[in-house]
Image (tube, grey):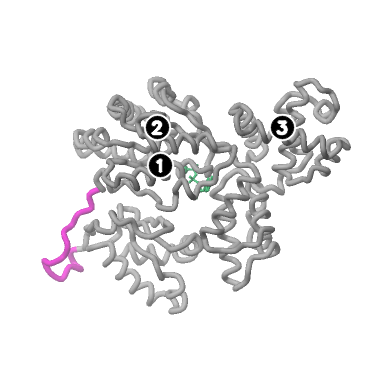
Amino acid sequence: MELDDIWQAALGELEVALSKANYTTWFRGTGLVDIVPPEAVISVPSAFVKTWFEKRYDQEILKTLKKLTDGAVTHITYMIGAPLPHQQSNPVHIQTKQHTAPSHTQPSIDLTPPDAMTTLRLRPEYTFDSFIVGSNNRLAYAACQAVAQTPGKMHNPLVVYGGVGLGKTHLVHAIGNALLARDPKLKLLYTSCEDFANDFVQSIQSKKSESFKKKYRSIDVFLVDDIQFLSRKEGTQEEFFHTFNALHQNDRQIVMTSDRIPTAIPDLESRLSSRFGMGMVADIQPPDLETRLAIVQEKATRAGMDVDPDVLSFIAESFISNIRELEGALNKVIAYCQLQGEQPTLDHARRALKDQLGAGAKGATTPSKLIDIVTRHFSITKEEIIGKQRNRKFVRPRHILMYLMRQECGMSYPQVGDALGGKDHTTIMHGSGVIEKELGRDDELREELGNIRATLYAK
Ligand code: ADP
Ligand code: MG
């Protein structure tokens, strides 16, 4: 059965199961992109529809697909965008139960895992174009662009590391999308480290080590997401080591992401972590307010929504340490308002996000909490940071505090001045400005701010 046939059959069932109005509203422009048991990938036209499918229709769609694939599908991923052409043409063989088979004309039974290139599933919307660059991710962005321009030459391997939801996967897909746009025949493999590990274990069990080796060692560009997953997996590490060497020796580009700097991955063989550091290691820090604002603006525009700037600011101020959450919040506000048939107002946004505006949100940060954390970070006292001493030991933390009060508490220059013992607003402008300027070129400073923010938003 072709993907298209399966989806048409599913649509037929869903049309019956759902009300007509719901069906026509939501299922227009959707498609079944791929089935890699146990997962099915469905494309939807917008972030808005995606949220609705995930929240409201997931169970219904899953039930239908499960039935049609005889249980092969147990999980659905929704992606925004049109089905990828190379995947559309792939026939998928789905097992059909004997007793439901009316005759020998049933499709062949084949649930073998996909071969090399079908594990490639780049999200078309994750491009360099749709990625907002700020001081928090400039280095990683530039490194990824360099790799996309001259794979195997500039930074090999490239490791991008940073916290959850900060755009690592987006950047790696952007590299893949850019390279394939230039050369569709390029042998590019994108995989999660987890899939690599599973694939490896399976290849041993099914005695297909040779074809595993051939598959991974014959590619031009290897994109591996979340290599922290290698932690404590000795066998996989060994295999990864050989794969890495085979590719690297032949100047094949390798790009990896990790949720922490590779040297901090527990129980990772040192021969691996040292190799990971041979090329370029670039961090992504949590974005500042300005960057967050640019991101929600970009996402709203892409969703075709004209959202009140106040609402966008509110969302950007409220969700700080994870862009996935930021995006989720925007989608939630949009969905909430479309349901009511109104343009989102600040009030709507507050109501729609009521539940999420707890721990991770900005409401949790107060100027006094910030003073507390910054002084502790630099081991100085509150009097010292607020005082007037021009010793660098105090001036630097003072400037950082000013900057963070603006960024994380959304305070005006005069408000920060007041909070810091009645300083003039020009003093605050200067101090905060110094940090802003240096952020772009000072990696250590960015990392320092990242650490302070991490403490601020821990738990
Ligand atoms: P990670 O892999 O680091 O956990 P993702 O790449 O999955 O994070 O990003 C989470 C979401 O946030 C994605 O939808 C991604 O498009 C979005 N995102 C992250 N950073 C940016 C950015 N700088 N500009 C635009 N979108 C971003
Ligand atoms: Mg990721």
When asked about the image quadrant of residue 85, the answer is: bottom left
User: Which residue has dot 3 on it?
Assistant: 434
Quick one: label 2 or label 3, which is nearer the N terminus? 2
Say which mark, if any, is on residue 373: none
State how far apart marks 3 and 1 are (Cα): 33 Å
Residue 175 got which mark?
A: 1
Q: Does the magenta run of residues contain 101?
A: yes
Q: Which residue is mark 2?
A: 230
Do the residues bearing badges 3 and 1 touch, measured as CB atoms within 8 Å?
no
Q: Nearer the viewer, residue 133 or 419?
A: 133
Residue in the picture at 26% in, 48% down: 114
SS at badge 3: helix
Q: Is residue 351 magenta?
A: no
Q: Secondary structure at mark 2?
A: helix
Q: Would residue 268 be visible to someone looking at this image?
A: no
Which of discs 2 and 3 lies nearer the camera? The answer is 3
Callout 3, which amino acid?
A: Val
Please rate how many residues cluster around mark 1, counting C-alpha atoms within 10 Å: few if below 14, some from 14 to 19, many from 20. many
Residue for point 77% across, 45% down: 411
Instruction: Using the numbered discs, state the Cα–Cα distance from disc 2 to disc 1 in whole angstroms.
Output: 22 Å
**Position of 315 compared to 129: left or right?**
right
On-image quarter of the C terminus? top right
> Which residues fall within the magenta stretch?
98-113
Task: Give the mark nearest the N terminus, 3 or 1.
Answer: 1
Image coordinates of residue 437 in percent, x first then y, are 67, 34
Q: Amino acid at mark 1?
A: Ile
